[in-house]
């Protein structure tokens, strides 16, 4: 099994799940800046040139949500059975993670990757911060009195592996106490710690918190 990975990318979701499942995995690191993700070799694995891709069972799978769902079905673990009410809850949070991640990616681009700073849009930064806060409030309310998203730990929690490192770079922890406590619990899991040690997940962040341009 080979996981194609970039530090700070959605591949962290998959790596965390792989560690939770106790599977062996080779990590193939790529760069966002050297053109490798646009090479024919990588496009054969992921046709949009996006991370992650997973080589497994004689084929490649792209899209992190698809990989997470495939691995839970393949291993028969960390997901409720299809057709159950719990499965609907699982799928909701699986996809909610990507809704939130897309906003976080926009904020990463605006705060970190766009150069020079004049290329950044304060209006978009404010808009996406508000949108992120909506998702954070929803999670915070859901997590009051809960340890995990479902009744027990599942791959839905792993889908937030990308988000956990980024959320409170842009939102105050004090505004979302249940969500902040959840993130701390997830980051303390042994499998998460093993995945994070391999992934280099916070490498893109030079600051603990990114203020909006207007303060």
Image (cartoon, rainbow, N blue to C red):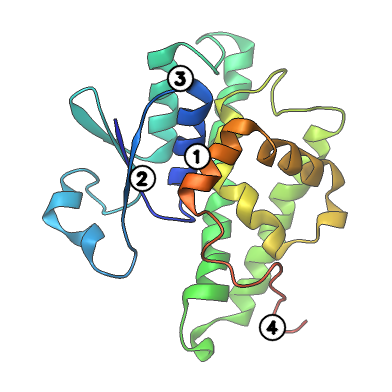
Q: Secondary structure at mark 3?
A: helix
Q: Would you identify the image quadrant in which residue 11 lies?
A: top left
Q: Closer to the camera, 133 or 40?
A: 40
In the image, taking residue 90 as reference, residue 73 lies left or right, namely: left
Whichever of callouts 4 and 2 sits on the residue coming sooner in the sequence is 2
Quarter holding the C terminus is: bottom right
Cα distance between the residues tagged 3 and 1: 13 Å
Q: Would you identify the image quadrant in which residue 54 lies?
A: top left
Cα distance between the residues tagged 1 and 2: 9 Å
Label 2 CA crowd tier, 10 Å (few <14, some 14–19, many 20+): many
Instruction: Determine the residue positioned at 57% across, 32% down.
Output: 191
Please tell me the numbered disc located at residue 52: 2
Instruction: Determine the residue positioned at 49% across, 22% down.
Output: 21
Are dots 1 and 2 in contact, CB under 8 Å? yes
Residue corresponding to mark 1 = 13
As displayed, is residue 17 above or below residue 132? Answer: above
Q: Position of residue 16 (x, y in %)?
A: 51, 35
Please tell me the numbered disc located at residue 139: none
Residue corresponding to mark 3 = 72
Label 1 CA crowd tier, 10 Å (few <14, some 14–19, many 20+): many
As displayed, is residue 82 above or below residue 3? Answer: above
């Amino acid at each position: 099994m080979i996981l194609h990975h970039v530090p700070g990318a959605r591949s962290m979701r998959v790596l965390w799940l792989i560690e939770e499942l106790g599977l062996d995995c080779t990590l193939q690191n790529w760069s966002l800046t050297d053109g490798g993700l646009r090479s024919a070799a990588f496009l054969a694995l992921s046709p949009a040139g996006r991370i992650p891709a997973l080589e497994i069972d004689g084929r490649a799978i792209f899209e992190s949500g698809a990989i997470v769902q495939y691995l839970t079905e393949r291993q028969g673990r960390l997901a409720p059975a299809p057709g159950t009410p719990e499965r609907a809850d699982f799928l909701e949070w699986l996809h909610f993670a990507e809704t939130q991640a897309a906003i976080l990616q926009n904020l990463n681009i605006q705060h970190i990757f766009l150069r020079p700073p004049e290329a950044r849009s304060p209006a978009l930064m404010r808009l996406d911060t508000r949108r992120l806060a909506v998702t954070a409030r929803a999670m915070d309310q859901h997590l009051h009195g809960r340890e995990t998203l479902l009744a027990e730990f599942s791959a839905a929690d792993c889908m937030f592996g990308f988000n956990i490192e980024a959320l409170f770079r842009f939102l105050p922890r004090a505004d979302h106490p249940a969500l902040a406590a959840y993130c701390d619990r997830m980051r303390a899991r042994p499998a998460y710690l093993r995945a994070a040690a391999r992934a280099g997940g916070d490498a893109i962040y030079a600051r603990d918190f990114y203020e909006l341009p207007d303060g």
